Image: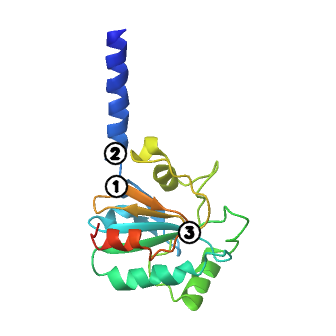
Amino acid sequence: MKHSLILFLLLTGTVQLLAQQRSLYEFTVQDIDGKEISLSTLKGKKVLVVNVASNCGYTPQYEALETLYTKYGTSGFTVIAFPANNFRGQEPGTNAEIKSFCTSTYHVTFPMMSKISVKGEDIHPLYTWLTQKDQNGVMDAPVTWNFQKFMIDESGHLIGMVDPATPPDCDKIVNWITNKK
């Protein structure tokens, strides 16, 4: 019995440690133009990962995301956005249509990725890592709606999440970017 308990604790700890060792840098994605991007190119930066949609009540958050990117983008911070059509068909467009909308309506200059799925059977591997504690070692954080924000530290590890309704320029995110408590 004692040996079984020790073995169980060791295995549980090993799984947790392995999950924490995984990082954002292990993933490759496609940008909105279809070019493969290794997320290892973001080493040393704080990264705000956001699933976005063009026809959502939260779509105006693009403006605050762009403001954050413009203000802090030269200080070791970036935003990467992933269009997703997982919630009431609020992102029905093609990558070209999404890019056109974001640049013409919100003047987005931060990196936009190709449209993916952020939940369900066809969830993108990056979002499996972001949303499952056994993958990221930190938390279960299933995507509940468009504009859920994941905070990734300079080492590529998930450190927190901000819900969709909370604006990107909230104190929690700004203080994290600027290293304030």
What distance separates the C-alpha of mark 1 from that of mark 2?
Answer: 7 Å
Near mark 2 (Cα within 10 A), the count class, few <14, some 14-19 or many ≥20, is some
What amino acid type is highlighted by mark number 2? Gln
Q: Which residue is mark 3?
A: 147
Q: Crowdedness of circle 1 by 10 Å Cα count: few (<14), some, many (20+)?
A: many
On residue 20, the disc is 2
Q: Is residue 122 left or right of residue 67?
A: right
**In this figure, which residue is indicated by the disc labeled 1?**
157
- Say whether marks 1 and 2 touch (CB < 8 Å): yes
Residue at image position (34%, 19%) is: 7
Left/right placement of residue 133 relative to residue 177 reads: right
Which secondary structure, mark 3?
loop
Q: Is residue 134 left or right of residue 143?
A: left
- Whether the residues at callouts 3 and 2 have beta carbons within 8 Å, the answer is no
Which amino acid type is marked by label 3? Phe
- Identify the amino acid type marked 1: His
Q: Quadrant of the N terminus?
A: top left
Q: Position of residue 146 (x, y in %)?
A: 60, 67
Q: Does 134 appear above or below 105?
A: above
Residue 158 versus residue 63 in the image, above or below? above
Q: Looking at the image, tell me whether mark 1 or mark 2 is earlier in sequence order.
A: 2
**Callout 1 secondary element:** loop
Q: Earlier in the sequence, mark 3 or mark 2?
A: 2
Q: Please state, as top left, top right, bottom left or bottom right, where the C terminus lies in the image.
A: bottom left
C-alpha distance separating marks 3 and 1: 20 Å
Please indicate, yes or no, whether residue 94 appears anywhere in the rendered image: yes
Q: CA distance from mark 3 to mark 2?
A: 24 Å
Q: Residue 121: image x %, image y %?
A: 64, 48
Specify whether residue 114 is in view. no
Q: What is the x, y in percent for residue 147?
A: 56, 69
In percent of the image, x 42 and y 73: which residue is there? Answer: 79
